[in-house]
Image (spheres, grey):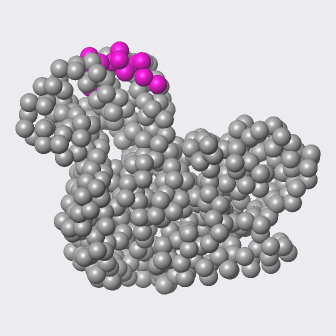
Protein backbone atom coordinates (compact mmCIF):
# COMPACT_ATOMS: atom_id res chain seq x y z
CA UNK A 1 0.00 0.00 0.00
CA UNK A 2 1.40 3.40 -0.97
CA UNK A 3 1.94 5.99 1.72
CA UNK A 4 -0.40 8.95 2.09
CA UNK A 5 2.13 11.60 1.05
CA UNK A 6 1.81 15.23 -0.04
CA UNK A 7 0.24 15.02 -3.52
CA UNK A 8 1.91 16.05 -6.76
CA UNK A 9 -0.60 17.89 -8.97
CA UNK A 10 -0.37 19.02 -12.57
CA UNK A 11 -2.88 21.84 -12.94
CA UNK A 12 -4.03 24.84 -10.93
CA UNK A 13 -7.58 23.69 -11.66
CA UNK A 14 -6.86 20.88 -9.19
CA UNK A 15 -5.69 23.38 -6.58
CA UNK A 16 -8.06 26.34 -6.46
CA UNK A 17 -11.79 26.94 -6.39
CA UNK A 18 -13.27 28.25 -9.67
CA UNK A 19 -13.72 31.74 -8.22
CA UNK A 20 -10.00 32.00 -7.39
CA UNK A 21 -8.40 30.42 -10.47
CA UNK A 22 -8.03 33.44 -12.74
CA UNK A 23 -6.30 35.57 -10.13
CA UNK A 24 -4.12 32.68 -8.98
CA UNK A 25 -2.97 31.82 -12.50
CA UNK A 26 -1.72 35.39 -12.91
CA UNK A 27 0.00 35.18 -9.52
CA UNK A 28 1.73 31.92 -10.40
CA UNK A 29 2.88 33.28 -13.76
CA UNK A 30 4.36 36.30 -12.01
CA UNK A 31 6.09 34.04 -9.50
CA UNK A 32 7.67 31.97 -12.30
CA UNK A 33 8.88 35.10 -14.09
CA UNK A 34 10.26 36.64 -10.90
CA UNK A 35 12.08 33.42 -10.03
CA UNK A 36 13.77 33.31 -13.43
CA UNK A 37 14.75 36.97 -13.15
CA UNK A 38 16.34 36.46 -9.74
CA UNK A 39 17.98 33.06 -10.13
CA UNK A 40 18.51 32.88 -13.92
CA UNK A 41 16.81 29.53 -14.17
CA UNK A 42 13.31 28.06 -14.10
CA UNK A 43 11.88 26.60 -10.90
CA UNK A 44 11.62 22.83 -10.97
CA UNK A 45 8.51 22.81 -8.77
CA UNK A 46 6.28 25.00 -6.61
CA UNK A 47 5.27 23.90 -3.11
CA UNK A 48 2.01 25.22 -1.72
CA UNK A 49 0.49 25.28 1.78
CA UNK A 50 -2.77 27.12 2.54
CA UNK A 51 -3.87 29.11 5.52
CA UNK A 52 -6.94 28.05 7.44
CA UNK A 53 -10.07 29.42 8.99
CA UNK A 54 -11.64 27.93 12.09
CA UNK A 55 -15.35 27.54 11.41
CA UNK A 56 -16.30 26.62 14.97
CA UNK A 57 -14.44 25.45 18.07
CA UNK A 58 -10.73 24.68 17.99
CA UNK A 59 -10.89 21.45 15.97
CA UNK A 60 -13.17 22.22 13.02
CA UNK A 61 -11.13 24.21 10.48
CA UNK A 62 -11.09 24.47 6.71
CA UNK A 63 -8.17 25.28 4.45
CA UNK A 64 -8.61 28.49 2.43
CA UNK A 65 -7.51 29.60 -1.02
CA UNK A 66 -4.97 32.07 0.36
CA UNK A 67 -1.64 30.32 0.73
CA UNK A 68 2.14 30.30 0.86
CA UNK A 69 3.92 29.42 -2.41
CA UNK A 70 7.58 28.48 -2.70
CA UNK A 71 9.04 28.27 -6.20
CA UNK A 72 12.09 26.04 -5.92
CA UNK A 73 15.10 24.86 -7.90
CA UNK A 74 17.53 22.28 -6.53
CA UNK A 75 21.04 21.67 -7.82
CA UNK A 76 22.42 18.46 -6.29
CA UNK A 77 25.96 18.01 -5.04
CA UNK A 78 25.92 14.31 -4.28
CA UNK A 79 27.85 13.23 -1.24
CA UNK A 80 28.60 16.67 0.13
CA UNK A 81 26.07 16.39 2.94
CA UNK A 82 25.72 20.18 2.98
CA UNK A 83 22.70 22.07 1.72
CA UNK A 84 23.09 25.74 0.81
CA UNK A 85 19.77 27.60 0.88
CA UNK A 86 19.18 30.90 -0.90
CA UNK A 87 15.86 32.21 0.34
CA UNK A 88 14.06 35.23 -1.09
CA UNK A 89 10.58 36.71 -0.89
CA UNK A 90 8.61 38.62 -3.51
CA UNK A 91 7.71 41.14 -0.79
CA UNK A 92 10.43 43.62 0.12
CA UNK A 93 9.16 43.41 3.69
CA UNK A 94 11.22 40.21 4.02
CA UNK A 95 14.94 40.53 3.25
CA UNK A 96 16.79 37.94 1.17
CA UNK A 97 18.99 35.60 3.15
CA UNK A 98 21.22 32.57 2.73
CA UNK A 99 22.45 29.88 5.09
CA UNK A 100 23.93 26.40 5.10
CA UNK A 101 22.87 23.19 6.76
CA UNK A 102 24.90 20.05 7.40
CA UNK A 103 22.27 17.39 6.82
CA UNK A 104 23.80 15.08 9.41
CA UNK A 105 23.68 17.80 12.08
CA UNK A 106 20.39 19.51 12.88
CA UNK A 107 22.23 21.78 15.29
CA UNK A 108 24.14 23.31 12.35
CA UNK A 109 21.02 25.34 11.52
CA UNK A 110 21.15 28.54 13.56
CA UNK A 111 18.09 30.68 14.22
CA UNK A 112 18.27 34.48 14.08
CA UNK A 113 16.07 36.40 16.51
CA UNK A 114 16.71 39.96 15.35
CA UNK A 115 16.73 41.80 12.03
CA UNK A 116 14.74 41.60 8.81
CA UNK A 117 15.80 38.02 7.99
CA UNK A 118 14.07 36.49 11.04
CA UNK A 119 11.29 35.26 8.76
CA UNK A 120 13.74 32.61 7.51
CA UNK A 121 13.48 30.91 10.91
CA UNK A 122 10.28 29.20 9.74
CA UNK A 123 12.25 27.54 6.94
CA UNK A 124 15.12 26.73 9.29
CA UNK A 125 12.99 25.03 11.92
CA UNK A 126 11.33 22.96 9.18
CA UNK A 127 14.76 21.60 8.25
CA UNK A 128 15.74 21.06 11.90
CA UNK A 129 12.54 19.17 12.55
CA UNK A 130 12.75 16.96 9.47
CA UNK A 131 16.39 15.89 9.66
CA UNK A 132 15.95 13.21 12.37
CA UNK A 133 13.17 11.65 10.26
CA UNK A 134 15.06 11.43 6.97
CA UNK A 135 16.68 8.19 5.77
CA UNK A 136 20.48 8.17 6.12
CA UNK A 137 21.04 8.04 2.35
CA UNK A 138 19.02 11.26 1.94
CA UNK A 139 21.19 13.02 4.51
CA UNK A 140 24.26 12.16 2.46
CA UNK A 141 22.97 14.37 -0.32
CA UNK A 142 23.68 18.06 -0.60
CA UNK A 143 23.63 20.91 -3.06
CA UNK A 144 22.00 24.28 -3.57
CA UNK A 145 18.40 25.20 -2.98
CA UNK A 146 17.00 28.39 -4.51
CA UNK A 147 13.62 29.36 -3.07
CA UNK A 148 11.32 32.30 -3.84
CA UNK A 149 8.38 32.77 -1.48
CA UNK A 150 5.05 34.44 -2.25
CA UNK A 151 2.46 34.57 0.52
CA UNK A 152 -1.15 35.65 0.23
CA UNK A 153 -2.03 34.68 3.82
CA UNK A 154 -1.88 37.95 5.75
CA UNK A 155 0.54 37.64 8.69
CA UNK A 156 -0.81 38.16 12.21
CA UNK A 157 -4.37 37.68 11.00
CA UNK A 158 -5.47 34.48 12.82
CA UNK A 159 -5.34 32.60 9.49
CA UNK A 160 -2.21 30.61 10.39
CA UNK A 161 0.35 32.13 8.06
CA UNK A 162 3.12 30.76 10.29
CA UNK A 163 1.80 27.19 10.07
CA UNK A 164 1.47 27.52 6.29
CA UNK A 165 5.04 28.83 6.10
CA UNK A 166 6.51 25.98 8.14
CA UNK A 167 4.43 23.38 6.30
CA UNK A 168 5.43 24.72 2.89
CA UNK A 169 9.10 24.81 3.92
CA UNK A 170 8.91 21.16 4.98
CA UNK A 171 7.45 20.19 1.61
CA UNK A 172 10.24 22.02 -0.23
CA UNK A 173 12.94 20.17 1.70
CA UNK A 174 11.28 16.77 1.30
CA UNK A 175 10.64 17.13 -2.42
CA UNK A 176 14.02 18.66 -3.28
CA UNK A 177 15.92 15.89 -1.50
CA UNK A 178 13.75 13.16 -3.03
CA UNK A 179 12.28 12.21 0.34
CA UNK A 180 8.61 13.05 -0.25
CA UNK A 181 7.67 9.37 -0.59
CA UNK A 182 9.41 8.54 2.70
CA UNK A 183 7.33 10.79 4.97
CA UNK A 184 3.52 10.35 5.12
CA UNK A 185 1.38 13.45 5.56
CA UNK A 186 0.49 12.52 9.13
CA UNK A 187 4.14 12.23 10.15
CA UNK A 188 5.03 15.43 8.32
CA UNK A 189 2.23 17.26 10.12
CA UNK A 190 3.39 16.02 13.52
CA UNK A 191 6.96 17.06 12.71
CA UNK A 192 5.80 20.48 11.54
CA UNK A 193 3.85 21.03 14.75
CA UNK A 194 6.99 20.38 16.79
CA UNK A 195 9.12 22.43 14.39
CA UNK A 196 7.00 25.55 14.76
CA UNK A 197 7.41 25.41 18.51
CA UNK A 198 11.13 26.01 17.96
CA UNK A 199 10.31 29.58 16.90
CA UNK A 200 8.28 30.14 20.04
CA UNK A 201 4.83 29.42 18.61
CA UNK A 202 3.04 27.12 21.06
CA UNK A 203 0.83 25.55 18.41
CA UNK A 204 -1.77 22.98 19.29
CA UNK A 205 -1.49 21.39 15.84
CA UNK A 206 -4.88 22.16 14.35
CA UNK A 207 -3.41 24.84 12.07
CA UNK A 208 -0.90 22.47 10.49
CA UNK A 209 -3.46 19.69 10.15
CA UNK A 210 -5.81 22.00 8.26
CA UNK A 211 -3.03 23.19 5.96
CA UNK A 212 -1.91 19.65 5.12
CA UNK A 213 -5.21 17.74 4.95
CA UNK A 214 -7.60 20.35 3.54
CA UNK A 215 -10.23 19.06 1.09
CA UNK A 216 -12.27 21.27 -1.29
CA UNK A 217 -15.84 21.89 -0.05
CA UNK A 218 -15.04 20.12 3.23
CA UNK A 219 -14.26 21.17 6.75
CA UNK A 220 -11.99 18.96 8.86
CA UNK A 221 -12.80 17.38 12.20
CA UNK A 222 -9.35 17.25 13.80
CA UNK A 223 -8.52 15.02 16.74
CA UNK A 224 -5.28 14.38 18.60
CA UNK A 225 -6.53 11.53 20.81
CA UNK A 226 -5.30 8.86 20.67
CA UNK A 227 -3.29 10.08 17.63
CA UNK A 228 -3.58 12.82 15.03
CA UNK A 229 -6.49 12.41 12.64
CA UNK A 230 -8.29 14.79 10.27
CA UNK A 231 -11.72 13.60 9.13
CA UNK A 232 -13.11 15.48 6.10
CA UNK A 233 -16.70 16.61 6.68
CA UNK A 234 -18.51 17.72 3.54
CA UNK A 235 -20.50 20.90 3.91
CA UNK A 236 -24.12 20.34 2.84
CA UNK A 237 -25.13 20.89 -0.76
CA UNK A 238 -27.93 23.38 -1.27
CA UNK A 239 -28.87 23.94 -4.89
CA UNK A 240 -31.62 26.44 -4.09
CA UNK A 241 -29.30 28.85 -2.29
CA UNK A 242 -25.50 28.64 -2.39
CA UNK A 243 -23.39 29.76 0.56
CA UNK A 244 -19.84 30.97 1.00
CA UNK A 245 -17.59 32.21 3.78
CA UNK A 246 -16.33 35.76 4.20
CA UNK A 247 -13.25 36.57 6.24
CA UNK A 248 -12.78 40.04 7.69
CA UNK A 249 -9.51 40.98 9.35
CA UNK A 250 -10.12 43.63 11.99
CA UNK A 251 -6.46 44.69 11.75
CA UNK A 252 -6.41 44.70 15.53
CA UNK A 253 -3.18 42.92 16.42
CA UNK A 254 -2.90 41.06 19.69
CA UNK A 255 0.76 40.72 20.67
CA UNK A 256 0.87 37.56 22.78
CA UNK A 257 4.26 38.49 24.22
CA UNK A 258 2.76 41.66 25.70
CA UNK A 259 -0.85 40.71 26.41
CA UNK A 260 -0.41 36.95 26.91
CA UNK A 261 -0.05 37.10 30.71
CA UNK A 262 -3.54 38.56 31.11
CA UNK A 263 -5.18 37.19 27.96
CA UNK A 264 -4.08 34.08 26.03
CA UNK A 265 -1.77 32.56 28.65
CA UNK A 266 -4.27 33.30 31.40
CA UNK A 267 -7.03 31.42 29.57
CA UNK A 268 -4.75 28.39 29.18
CA UNK A 269 -4.00 28.44 32.90
CA UNK A 270 -7.66 28.96 33.84
CA UNK A 271 -8.80 25.95 31.79
CA UNK A 272 -6.07 23.81 33.35
CA UNK A 273 -7.10 24.97 36.79
CA UNK A 274 -10.73 24.19 35.99
CA UNK A 275 -9.71 20.67 34.96
CA UNK A 276 -7.69 20.19 38.14
CA UNK A 277 -10.44 21.47 40.45
CA UNK A 278 -13.04 19.25 38.79
CA UNK A 279 -10.73 16.24 38.93
CA UNK A 280 -10.38 16.65 42.70
CA UNK A 281 -14.08 17.38 43.23
CA UNK A 282 -15.09 14.31 41.20
CA UNK A 283 -12.32 12.14 42.68
CA UNK A 284 -11.01 11.11 39.25
CA UNK A 285 -7.48 12.49 39.53
CA UNK A 286 -5.93 9.01 39.79
CA UNK A 287 -7.49 7.94 36.49
CA UNK A 288 -6.29 11.12 34.80
CA UNK A 289 -2.70 10.48 35.86
CA UNK A 290 -2.78 7.26 33.84
CA UNK A 291 -3.33 9.25 30.63
CA UNK A 292 -0.52 10.54 28.43
CA UNK A 293 1.02 13.76 29.85
CA UNK A 294 -0.08 16.12 27.07
CA UNK A 295 -3.70 15.10 27.67
CA UNK A 296 -3.89 15.09 31.47
CA UNK A 297 -4.46 18.79 32.11
CA UNK A 298 -7.49 19.12 29.87
CA UNK A 299 -11.19 19.36 30.53
CA UNK A 300 -11.72 16.57 28.00
CA UNK A 301 -9.53 14.29 30.13
CA UNK A 302 -11.75 15.07 33.13
CA UNK A 303 -14.86 14.16 31.15
CA UNK A 304 -13.37 10.90 29.91
CA UNK A 305 -12.13 9.98 33.39
CA UNK A 306 -15.48 10.86 34.97
CA UNK A 307 -17.53 8.60 32.71
CA UNK A 308 -15.03 5.74 32.91
CA UNK A 309 -14.85 5.99 36.72
CA UNK A 310 -18.61 6.28 37.18
CA UNK A 311 -20.32 4.36 34.37
CA UNK A 312 -23.60 4.53 36.27
CA UNK A 313 -23.57 8.32 35.85
CA UNK A 314 -23.93 7.87 32.09
CA UNK A 315 -26.84 5.49 32.52
CA UNK A 316 -28.47 7.95 34.91
CA UNK A 317 -28.03 10.77 32.40
CA UNK A 318 -29.90 8.79 29.77
CA UNK A 319 -32.98 8.87 31.96
CA UNK A 320 -33.19 12.60 31.24
CA UNK A 321 -35.28 13.45 28.15
CA UNK A 322 -33.03 16.40 27.25
CA UNK A 323 -29.92 14.21 27.32
CA UNK A 324 -31.65 11.54 25.23
CA UNK A 325 -32.54 14.15 22.61
CA UNK A 326 -28.92 15.29 22.41
CA UNK A 327 -27.78 11.67 22.17
CA UNK A 328 -30.14 10.99 19.27
CA UNK A 329 -29.26 14.20 17.43
CA UNK A 330 -25.49 14.42 17.90
CA UNK A 331 -24.26 11.19 19.51
CA UNK A 332 -22.94 9.89 22.80
CA UNK A 333 -20.00 12.28 23.15
CA UNK A 334 -22.28 15.31 22.71
CA UNK A 335 -24.67 13.95 25.32
CA UNK A 336 -21.79 13.40 27.74
CA UNK A 337 -20.63 16.97 27.18
CA UNK A 338 -24.13 18.14 28.05
CA UNK A 339 -23.75 16.14 31.23
CA UNK A 340 -20.42 17.83 31.98
CA UNK A 341 -22.10 21.22 31.77
CA UNK A 342 -24.26 20.09 34.69
CA UNK A 343 -21.12 19.00 36.54
CA UNK A 344 -19.65 22.48 36.02
CA UNK A 345 -22.81 24.09 37.42
CA UNK A 346 -22.58 21.89 40.51
CA UNK A 347 -18.86 22.02 41.29
CA UNK A 348 -17.36 25.31 40.07
CA UNK A 349 -18.15 28.64 41.75
CA UNK A 350 -19.49 31.30 39.41
CA UNK A 351 -17.30 34.01 40.91
CA UNK A 352 -13.56 34.34 40.43
CA UNK A 353 -11.28 32.32 42.71
CA UNK A 354 -8.09 33.63 44.29
CA UNK A 355 -4.91 31.63 44.77
CA UNK A 356 -5.68 30.61 48.35
CA UNK A 357 -9.05 29.21 47.29
CA UNK A 358 -7.49 27.44 44.32
CA UNK A 359 -4.81 25.80 46.45
CA UNK A 360 -7.53 24.31 48.64
CA UNK A 361 -9.61 23.23 45.63
CA UNK A 362 -6.67 21.60 43.81
CA UNK A 363 -5.04 20.26 47.01
CA UNK A 364 -1.74 21.69 45.80
CA UNK A 365 0.00 24.31 47.92
CA UNK A 366 2.87 26.75 47.63
CA UNK A 367 5.61 25.67 45.25
CA UNK A 368 3.68 22.60 44.11
CA UNK A 369 0.80 24.82 42.96
CA UNK A 370 3.17 27.23 41.23
CA UNK A 371 4.97 24.40 39.44
CA UNK A 372 1.73 22.80 38.28
CA UNK A 373 -0.04 25.90 36.98
CA UNK A 374 2.10 29.04 36.93
CA UNK A 375 5.58 27.99 35.86
CA UNK A 376 4.97 27.33 32.15
CA UNK A 377 3.44 30.70 31.20
CA UNK A 378 3.75 34.18 32.71
CA UNK A 379 0.35 35.10 34.15
CA UNK A 380 -1.04 38.28 35.71
CA UNK A 381 -4.29 37.83 37.62
CA UNK A 382 -5.71 38.14 41.10
CA UNK A 383 -8.84 36.14 40.30
CA UNK A 384 -9.30 33.12 38.05
CA UNK A 385 -12.69 32.50 36.42
CA UNK A 386 -12.91 28.74 36.17
CA UNK A 387 -16.69 28.44 35.83
CA UNK A 388 -16.87 30.67 32.76
CA UNK A 389 -13.92 29.02 31.03
CA UNK A 390 -15.09 25.45 31.66
CA UNK A 391 -18.64 26.26 30.60
CA UNK A 392 -17.34 27.70 27.34
CA UNK A 393 -15.01 24.78 26.64
CA UNK A 394 -17.66 22.11 27.17
CA UNK A 395 -20.43 24.02 25.38
CA UNK A 396 -18.16 24.85 22.43
CA UNK A 397 -17.09 21.21 22.13
CA UNK A 398 -20.78 20.33 22.09
CA UNK A 399 -21.43 22.90 19.33
CA UNK A 400 -18.64 21.39 17.23
CA UNK A 401 -20.28 17.98 17.45
CA UNK A 402 -23.68 19.48 16.64
CA UNK A 403 -22.16 21.22 13.59
CA UNK A 404 -20.56 17.97 12.47
CA UNK A 405 -23.77 15.98 13.03
CA UNK A 406 -25.84 18.50 11.04
CA UNK A 407 -23.45 18.24 8.08
CA UNK A 408 -23.26 14.46 8.22
CA UNK A 409 -27.01 14.02 8.55
CA UNK A 410 -27.80 16.50 5.75
CA UNK A 411 -25.37 14.77 3.38
CA UNK A 412 -26.69 11.31 4.22
CA UNK A 413 -30.28 12.42 3.67
CA UNK A 414 -29.36 14.62 0.70
CA UNK A 415 -31.17 17.36 2.53
CA UNK A 416 -30.91 20.52 0.44
CA UNK A 417 -33.01 22.69 2.73
CA UNK A 418 -31.56 26.12 3.52
CA UNK A 419 -32.68 25.42 7.10
CA UNK A 420 -29.54 23.29 7.52
CA UNK A 421 -27.37 26.32 6.88
CA UNK A 422 -29.51 28.44 9.18
CA UNK A 423 -28.83 25.91 11.94
CA UNK A 424 -25.10 25.95 11.17
CA UNK A 425 -25.16 29.74 11.25
CA UNK A 426 -26.98 29.71 14.57
CA UNK A 427 -24.23 27.53 16.04
CA UNK A 428 -21.59 30.00 14.82
CA UNK A 429 -23.51 32.90 16.38
CA UNK A 430 -23.83 31.08 19.69
CA UNK A 431 -20.14 30.26 19.52
CA UNK A 432 -19.21 33.94 19.24
CA UNK A 433 -21.51 34.84 22.11
CA UNK A 434 -19.81 32.23 24.28
CA UNK A 435 -16.35 33.43 23.23
CA UNK A 436 -17.43 36.99 24.06
CA UNK A 437 -19.13 36.45 27.41
CA UNK A 438 -17.66 33.23 28.85
CA UNK A 439 -14.17 32.86 27.41
CA UNK A 440 -13.92 36.65 27.12
CA UNK A 441 -11.50 36.67 24.18
CA UNK A 442 -13.37 38.95 21.80
CA UNK A 443 -12.80 42.70 21.48
CA UNK A 444 -14.72 45.76 20.30
CA UNK A 445 -13.36 45.47 16.75
CA UNK A 446 -14.37 41.82 16.39
CA UNK A 447 -17.82 42.49 17.83
CA UNK A 448 -18.24 45.37 15.39
CA UNK A 449 -17.49 43.37 12.23
CA UNK A 450 -19.66 40.52 13.50
CA UNK A 451 -22.59 42.90 14.06
CA UNK A 452 -22.16 44.61 10.68
CA UNK A 453 -22.06 41.30 8.82
CA UNK A 454 -25.13 39.91 10.59
CA UNK A 455 -27.15 43.05 9.91
CA UNK A 456 -26.42 42.84 6.18
CA UNK A 457 -26.92 39.16 5.43
CA UNK A 458 -24.55 36.87 7.33
CA UNK A 459 -26.45 34.01 8.94
CA UNK A 460 -23.53 33.08 11.21
CA UNK A 461 -20.53 35.12 12.35
CA UNK A 462 -17.84 34.46 14.93
CA UNK A 463 -14.26 35.32 15.71
CA UNK A 464 -11.69 32.84 14.42
CA UNK A 465 -8.29 32.16 15.92
CA UNK A 466 -7.05 33.07 19.38
CA UNK A 467 -9.14 36.22 19.68
CA UNK A 468 -8.50 39.72 21.08
CA UNK A 469 -8.07 40.81 17.46
CA UNK A 470 -7.45 39.15 14.13
CA UNK A 471 -10.28 37.85 11.98
CA UNK A 472 -13.95 36.99 12.03
CA UNK A 473 -15.57 34.44 9.73
CA UNK A 474 -19.06 34.86 8.32
CA UNK A 475 -21.41 32.31 6.71
CA UNK A 476 -23.12 34.22 3.90
CA UNK A 477 -25.71 33.31 1.25
CA UNK A 478 -24.19 34.06 -2.14
CA UNK A 479 -27.04 36.41 -3.00
CA UNK A 480 -26.07 38.47 0.07
CA UNK A 481 -22.31 38.42 -0.56
CA UNK A 482 -22.16 41.85 -2.18
CA UNK A 483 -24.25 43.38 0.57
CA UNK A 484 -22.03 41.97 3.34
CA UNK A 485 -18.76 42.97 1.63
CA UNK A 486 -20.04 46.47 0.86
CA UNK A 487 -21.27 47.00 4.41
CA UNK A 488 -18.00 45.87 5.99
CA UNK A 489 -16.06 48.06 3.58
CA UNK A 490 -18.23 51.10 4.24
CA UNK A 491 -18.98 50.75 7.95
CA UNK A 492 -15.68 49.35 9.19
CA UNK A 493 -12.71 49.74 6.84
CA UNK A 494 -13.55 53.13 5.33
CA UNK A 495 -14.39 54.42 8.79
CA UNK A 496 -11.33 53.07 10.64
CA UNK A 497 -8.76 52.44 7.87
CA UNK A 498 -9.46 54.95 5.07
CA UNK A 499 -5.85 54.71 3.87
CA UNK A 500 -6.27 51.14 2.55
CA UNK A 501 -6.03 50.82 -1.22
CA UNK A 502 -7.94 48.13 -3.13
CA UNK A 503 -5.08 45.62 -3.04
CA UNK A 504 -4.72 46.03 0.71
CA UNK A 505 -8.47 45.79 1.17
CA UNK A 506 -8.54 42.51 -0.77
CA UNK A 507 -6.06 41.10 1.74
CA UNK A 508 -8.21 41.92 4.75
CA UNK A 509 -11.73 41.34 3.41
CA UNK A 510 -12.49 38.47 1.06
CA UNK A 511 -14.77 35.56 0.28
CA UNK A 512 -13.34 32.06 0.41
CA UNK A 513 -14.40 28.44 0.15
CA UNK A 514 -12.96 25.35 1.85
CA UNK A 515 -9.88 24.60 -0.23
CA UNK A 516 -7.36 21.90 -1.05
CA UNK A 517 -4.55 21.28 1.38
CA UNK A 518 -0.81 21.32 0.80
CA UNK A 519 0.53 20.08 -2.51
CA UNK A 520 3.30 20.30 -5.10
CA UNK A 521 2.74 21.53 -8.64
The residue that appears at 77% across and 69% down in the rendered structure is 43
Q: What is the x, y in percent for residue 379? A: 42, 38
Front residue of this view, candidates 333 and 362? 333
Horizontally, residue 78 falls left or right of residue 293, namely right
Tally of numbered tags: 0
Q: What is the x, y in percent for residue 82? A: 87, 47
User: Secondary structure of the magenta portion, mostly?
Assistant: helix
Q: What is the x, y in percent for residue 226? A: 45, 32
Q: What is the x, y in percent for residue 58? A: 38, 48
Front residue of this view, candidates 410 and 426? 410
The residue that appears at 66% across and 66% down in the rendered structure is 521
Q: Which quadrant of the structure image shows residue 510? A: bottom left
Q: Which residues are magenta?
A: 277-292
Looking at the image, can residue 104 be seen? Answer: yes
The residue that appears at 13% across and 30% down in the rendered structure is 317
Residue 280 falls within the magenta-colored stretch:
yes
Horizontally, residue 161 falls left or right of residue 58, namely right
Amino acid sequence: MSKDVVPLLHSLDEVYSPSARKEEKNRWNNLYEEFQARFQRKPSFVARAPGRVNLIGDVFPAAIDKDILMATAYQPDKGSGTLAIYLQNVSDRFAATEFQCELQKAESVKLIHQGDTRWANYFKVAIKGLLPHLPSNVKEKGGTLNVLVDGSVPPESSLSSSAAMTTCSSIVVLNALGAREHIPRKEMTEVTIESERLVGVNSGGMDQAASVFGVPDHALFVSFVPTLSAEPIQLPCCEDEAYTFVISNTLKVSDKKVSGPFQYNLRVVETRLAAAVLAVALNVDANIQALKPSYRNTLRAVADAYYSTYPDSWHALLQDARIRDVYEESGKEAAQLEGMLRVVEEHLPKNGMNRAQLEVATQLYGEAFHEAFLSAFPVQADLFYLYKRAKHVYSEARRVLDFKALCTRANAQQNESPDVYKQLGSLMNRSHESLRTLYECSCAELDTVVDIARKHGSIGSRLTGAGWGGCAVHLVPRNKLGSVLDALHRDYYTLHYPELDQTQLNDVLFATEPARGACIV
